Image (cartoon, grey):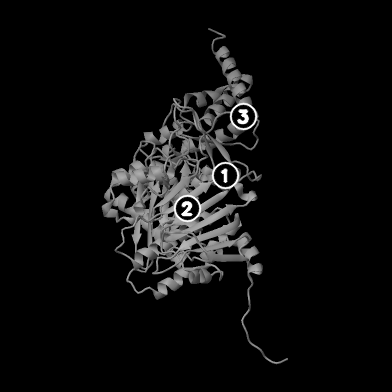
Amino acid sequence: MAQQQGSISIHAQNIMPIIKRWLYSDKDIFIREMVSNGCDAITKRRMIAPAETDDYRVTVTLDAQKGELTFSDNGIGMTADEVERYINQVAFSGAEEFLKNYEGEDKGGIIGHFGLGFYSAFMVADRVTIETLSGSQGATPVRWVSEDGMAFTMEDGSRTQRGTDIILHISPEEKDFLEEYRVREVLRRYCGFMSTPVYFDVVKPQPEQKPEGEDKPQQPQGPERINATPALWLKAPKDCTEDEYKQFYREVFHTFEDPLFYVHLNVDYPFNLKGILYFPKITNDFGTREGEIKLFSGQVFVADNIKEVIPEFLMLLKGVIDCPDLPLNVSRSFLQNDGYVKKLSAYITRKVADRLTSLFHDERDAYQRYWDDIHPFVKYGCMRDAKFFDQVKDTLLFKTTKGEYMTLQEYLAKNEGALGKKVVYTNDPTRQAASVGLYDAENIDVAVMDTLIDLNFMSFMEYSAGVEGLTFLRVDAQTDSFTREANDDEKKQYEENEKALKELFAAATGQDDLSVKVAALKDSTLPAVLTQDEQGRRFGEMSRIYGQDFHMPQAHTLVLNADNAVVQSLLKLEPGHKRDLVAAQLYDLARMSTRPLEKEEVTAFLSRSQELLGMLFENP
């Protein structure tokens, strides 16, 4: 066979079904494309006729009775030759050709590609009509009509003013795009910040004539401005006021709350990026919630929460990010493998970290006020992004039960004499108040770690903070800090008593594997405390959080206070029911300082308490 060369031919009947089904993930994007085309036409007109003072606008008109949605602009318009090139040749970019031939200095502001984007209309319309008139000298109006995007008719049109109307006759299957609320919602979402004024007009049915003397019907309202809120992120940070930031936040995210603080992104090199990220109040249930970060390309909305552009942990924030260099119809696979996007993501992370560190160093009091709201987000970011952690690790705060805020180094420096490289914490200050009080008596700070993320965060810090031997211990994990040193004779006596007491408490509680220890606690009024192995308890809690069925035995140790009168009396009691009651009561009292009793346990505790009270007064 002889060698031959040629070009592959693509026919409209082959490509149109693909465009109509796969060009966009959401059909409502056709509205964005139609409005973008109108904005581009106006931008082109402004570029070639900058002295004009026309009232440039794009108007979207809904006529439900006719079943039509019309997109009108008073931009550059098209000649018959231009319609032939830009519409009849699918995917030909009029924007690229225009910029190539345009000789002015300002080559920015063109949103998309008139051509391929135009054909998104056929996803929802069974007939599309273009009425256009070019602003060039001697131009005549053109009408173009197609029912399927493949066959068309083109003839002289009826438009008398420069610009273009694109009239979509909505197909019956897509009639929700004839609903006023639906069109308005899509327009506000995609076009709410476009630089060209965008209006929405609804054709109302003609009211019936009323007899003379009756109230006349109200006149219909004029077109509604869709993009009345200015794009605040385009202003330089120095030109924005605190009130403007807060008002923008309330309007865009439909909330009455003010943000805690914000980060204004504004960079032209090495990439073009502008935006504002807001820190909302983040509650303990942050793991079940998601923020809202809107991605724009040249003021045109692209999507919410694009994880390839915005680091995952920043999804807890709210904000807008505008990247004009990103194409409107960007694919996830493109984003995942694009070096530009990775640099963009890293820059956003760095700017957020810079804002946090500057707050910490320059406005420590304000930073501490914010900490209760933002610390889940900051901790999550540290665990998800190593570079973010490196930037903010010295600003991480630990709130104590006394309401003080300390960095890790500040905590260790203050408590090192008593704890070494340990951090003592509580995850329930109310329930564990008795144990917290023991540390308070020794002037040892107890950190509050009571959010869902803290369990993982403590483990993360133990191996990532760069402090050798760093350990987090819950207030009920040990008694070393509030135990006095016993002499040799006392230690010998404790060892002798432990064996007998272990048998006693095993029988009284029904727990044969219960570990019992005798020690001299500094607070002689406290009869006993129950300690739990930190790592075993932490592992068990993590398993429950992640819904795993694996149950690791919990290692409990009942520490009996050798200096307490009740414990001393218990040792002297004769074996029997009364001694068993006292032992079981001591165990429950110790356990109640770490966790609440369960239903059956509460019943047993109350019954036992009543019986012991009865014994106390049976021989007055």
Task: Mark 3 vs mark 2: give the one in front.
Answer: 2
Residues at circles 1 and 2 in contact by the CB criterion of under 8 Å: no
Between residue 546 and residue 1, name the one nearer to us. 1
Instruction: Find the distance from the CA under tag 3 to the CA under tag 2.
Output: 73 Å
- With respect to residue 610, does 303 lie above or below? below
Q: Earlier in the sequence, mark 3 or mark 1?
A: 1
Between residue 387 and residue 261, name the one nearer to us. 261
Q: Determine crowd level at label 2: few under 14, some 14-19, many 20+ residues with C-alpha closer than 10 A.
A: many
Name of the residue lying farthest toward the bottom:
2
Q: Where is residue 339? Give x, y as percent.
A: 47, 69
Instruction: Find the distance from the CA under tag 3 to the CA under tag 1.
Output: 88 Å
Residue 90 occupies quadrant: bottom right
- With respect to residue 113, does 509 lie above or below? above
Q: Amino acid at mark 2?
A: Tyr
Q: Earlier in the sequence, mark 3 or mark 2?
A: 2
Q: Amino acid at mark 3?
A: Leu
Residue plotted at (67% across, 91% down): 3
- Residue 204 visible to an observer of this rendering: yes
Residue plotted at (53% across, 29% down): 592
Q: Where is residue 460? Give x, y as percent.
A: 48, 53
Q: Secondary structure at mark 3?
A: helix
Name of the residue lying farthest toward the right:
1
Q: Quadrant of the N terminus?
A: bottom right
Q: Determine crowd level at label 3: few under 14, some 14-19, many 20+ residues with C-alpha closer than 10 A.
A: some
Name the residue carrying label 3: 504
Between residue 579 and residue 385, name the one nearer to us. 385
Name the residue carrying label 1: 65
Q: Earlier in the sequence, mark 1 or mark 2?
A: 1
Q: Amino acid at mark 1?
A: Gln
Residues at circles 3 and 1 in contact by the CB criterion of under 8 Å: no
Number of the label disc, if any, that sits on residue 190: 2
Asked whether, in this view, residue 346 is left or right of residue 239, the answer is right
